[in-house]
Amino acid sequence: MTWQRETFKKIKQLPREEQVLPGTSLCAGCGGLEALRLAAKVLGPNVVYVNAAGCFTLLAVYPFTPFHGSWLYTTMGSAPAGAQGIRDALDVLIAKGRLPQDDDLKVVVLAGDGSTYDMGLSATSAAIYRNLDFYYFCYDNEAYGNTGMQLSSATPFGAMTTTSPCSLQHPAGATREKKDLFEIWRAHRPPYIATISPRHPLDLAEKFTRAARVTGPKLFLALSACPTGWGYDPAQTTEVARLAVESGLWPLKESVNGTVTHTYVPKRKPVEEYLKLQTRFRHLFEPARQDEAIRHIQDHVDAYWAEAAAASGAT
């Protein structure tokens, strides 16, 4: 069955009101900020953002903020715990009649892949187990971007980071596959999980609209193309983000009560079109082409989509 958008069918239908204003100190060309800006349009102004330490810490530097909503800063590992405290406080105020139901706020965790895949995973698992009603927005730039692009468990095979350099012992750079956080969350049985990309704004907006209909933990994994860490001109962010999806490396999908649907199935361009744009993968092509490593990445993508096709009954 083909996935259909119900609310957003044309780009002009996206909310015009901006909830994240310009003028932040984030890097030029940040794909994560573009994804958050689009998401915030759907979330609206009645939001409390709980920010785990990371790149997005630079979004709101006291006393300045680009948000219409509220902001709470936490350590890298405790953002879901902060979200729990806020959600509990709101529920108590509503129950006592001190806060009208119409003034209720959405609670949104903002965290990078370092917090999401690594340091905050324990607190996140506990929050999902407690069925906390919150949104978890992960801006995934596949490394510890705020501290110099060190390896995280979201770093893909073959990428070069400051702690997984290309070397004689490891000529391909990072030697491990990226952790599958989508499936880790799905094993917890939350009501809604999705991957998103700012290059597919209607897909992104539709998913946030669908998630708003359910109560409980809601995860959004946002592809966050990173010119500073990935090594490309900021003007190429749109092309890098587009090729991540079109090559099949970043599947767009959702899980509703455990049932997975791919919301966009690309015809799939060769992965090297995506890899060649970034200096973090340059060692796979220069000074000598590493065909085995490139083939390994391509085979991994092909195997994923073959399994997805088999699961959906497609040919």
Image (tube, rainbow, N blue to C red):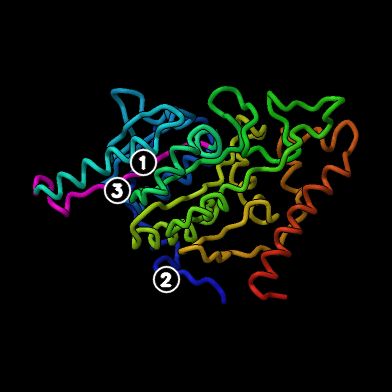
Q: Residue at x 36, y 48 (%)?
A: 130
The label shown at residue 20 is 1
Q: First in sequence: mark 3 or mark 2?
A: 2
Mark 2 lies on residue: 6
Q: First in sequence: mark 3 or mark 1?
A: 1
Mark 2 crowd level (few <14, some 14–19, many ≥20, 10 Å Cα): few
Q: Nearer the viewer, residue 308 or 18?
A: 308
Q: First in sequence: mark 1 or mark 2?
A: 2
Q: Residue at x 42, y 71 (%)?
A: 6
Image coordinates for residue 202, horizontal then vertical, percent = 47, 60
Q: Amino acid at mark 3?
A: Lys
Secondary structure at numbered mark 3:
strand
**Which residues, given as a range, are shown in magenta?**
97-112
Q: Nearer the viewer, residue 312 or 69?
A: 312
Foreground label between 1 and 2: 2
Q: Is residue 275 above or below residue 242?
A: above
Secondary structure at numbered mark 2:
loop
The label shown at residue 106 is 3
